[in-house]
Image (tube, grey):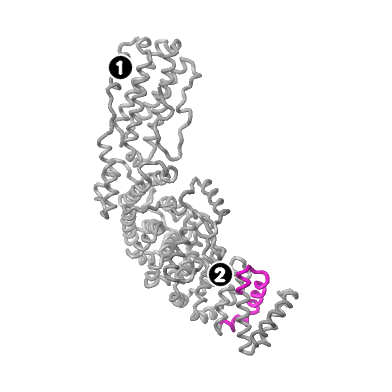
Amino acid sequence: MASTGVFFHPQRGRSPSPGAFLARVSLCESTLIQTLIDMSKNLVNSFSNKSFSLQCKNFRSLIRKIEIFIMLFEHLHDSGYSVALSSTAKLCFEEFYVLLYQSKILFDDCTQTSRIWLLIQNCMISHGFQYLDREISMVLDVCPLQELISCEDVREQVELLRKQLERNEFLIDQRDEAMRIRLFGFVEEFGFGTIPDAMELRALFQERLGIEDANSYRREIEFLEELICHHEDYIEPNPSVLKGIIALTQYCRFLFCGFEDDDGMINFENHGEQMKNLITEEIAKTFVTLPKEFSCPISLDLMQDPVVVSTGQTFDRSSISKWLKRQHMRRENYTCPTTGQLLAHIVLAPNRALKNLISLWCVAQGMFSEPKDTHRQISPPVSSTRAVIEANRATAMLLIKQLSCGPDIGKTVAARWLQMLASIREEDAVYIAVAGSIPLFRKLLSSPHPKAQENSINAILTLSAYYSNMSLIMDEVGCLELIVKVMRSGYTEIARENAASILSTLCTVHDYKTRIAGKEGAISGLLWLLKMGTPREKKVAIGTLYLLSSHVDNCSKLVEADAVEFLAEAMENKGVAESATGALNFLVKHPIGANAVRKDGKAISGLLILRISGTNRARATAVATLRELYRDCLQCNQLRRAVPAFLTNPLIPAVYRFREGQCIAASFAGYAR
């Protein structure tokens, strides 16, 4: 009799109802026969006219069996046997109900699921059809049909069906099996470093599987990615092989479908309008808009395992670990990627509260995190196999070619996908940069289309995270100037913020600090962001200014740009006060900077306030800055002018002025001795 489980076949976004495997035993005989007739006809009408790219013979065979059932059930209904069934006959017809329901699930799975997955599971799906054949044969053997069937034609059809089922053998369509073997052969070719023949790929994916447009390719990829995410521990083939197939499918998507939008070319006129008028459906579906608080400042991807460094900044564990590893290999001091501050330690504290919020957001968005592997990127998937690496590189070359000579919409989509590929691993980012993408991104920075500019700046930011790519960016003629221009007047907030982040990343190389500060508009643009930008823009700007101020040759440039005034105002903002104090601390170590800070009463007031009410790090930096300044005053014999401004400032309560006066006097006494 029918089992409660036909076969395992995971399907995206759908789970069979438990009622699919249970007979409606409460139905009377006449209602049961009529239900069987309706179900059988519904199956035949729904699926008999469909064209199947896979499992064609099994589909047609099962449809023919159901057509014979319709003849049988209608005969019983018309003959009046439906009201006088024996207990054995009724039990058998209840089993017919279960088998029809299981047939419907099998049909639905095979027509609604990924075609690539259907091909991969060709043998298992064939076993599902064989299972139904065995169950049908068993029911026909047990059911007393000879007593019920009076029509000779119906009896002959049922008897013929029974004999066919008795000698029926396990059927695997050799054409489908050859396609499955060829699919794995393409993955192996990439594994050996060879790009498969385009004509053969087209024959398999488009002509035989019927995957003909960008939406179809995207659905195939999404299905396989979700399959890995939810069934990683027990799917066959193993996830590493599936990731190779995903990379192959991604390559075919760009090879055959190009980069145009599904609804036609985008209308780029009136680019000053809202972003929705500038984005195609293809670009919009390529990525999910993440809340800024949930994205890692380094990779720009959703954080899977957020951790906090000693400066209080939050990063994804995998990204900050790579950052610290690179600094260790270059024997540099450990610094915060966002603020540029030195890290007191490299202990990464889990941010469980943020991780819980991200999990809730993912559920609300229909996304699912991966608790067992927090180092995996969301999309595209990461794999260690050579096939995935080579397929991704072949895809990158297609994207770079499109970035070079494609239409505007194609360049926009290509820039986004290159950024995604570069975020997978360092080797991919280096390959993309060396392959000549940076000059093309530079050209796209001048695009009048906001999304093109934003995608390009995001891609450069991802590439700049790796030391070997920094020199390529710095040496590209005009690239740094355009990055500064985007930071000052980019179309979108994300573009301006990420342009400043690029400067911050490049400033981690000491020799680049003077080159960046020397670019027209760089310092003034950062100061403008510090004053007028969003909270995130202010954090990025102050981090970059902090790094620039650490180079002694930049002190005069910062002072000339009135950086002291902006930093003094920034100290009133708790989010950037620490970095602002650190920048002032660097400036006062230079005579020009010390003189500028000494003349700015607001800067002195801010340091005194932080000395009392700031965070531990802000207090320590403020004290160090004040002492450095007082020592300079003492050495320059300018104590008489400097101290009264500190002690009589009305912003400081009297008790604190008295305390600071004692502190200053003690400091001066120590220096005098």
Kindly identify which numbered label has been placed on residue 385: none
- Relative to 367, residue 44 above or below: above
Q: Residues within 10 Å of mark 1 (few under 14, many from 20)?
A: some
* Residue 299 coordinates in the image, percent (x, y): 46, 59
Q: Is residue 134 magenta?
A: no
Residue furthest bottom as drawn? 637
Decide if residue 448 is in sight here.
Answer: no
* Residue 578 coordinates in the image, percent (x, y): 59, 70
* SS assignment at label 2: helix
Tag 1 residue: 157
* Residue 510 coordinates in the image, percent (x, y): 45, 75
- Relative to 621, residue 262 above or below: above
Tag 2 residue: 530
Determine which quarter of the picture holds residue 659: bottom right
Q: Amino acid at mark 2?
A: Leu
Label 2 or label 1, whichever lies nearer to me, is: 1
Nearest to the observer: residue 496 or residue 341: 341
Q: Quadrant of the N terminus?
A: top left
Q: Amino acid at mark 1?
A: Gln
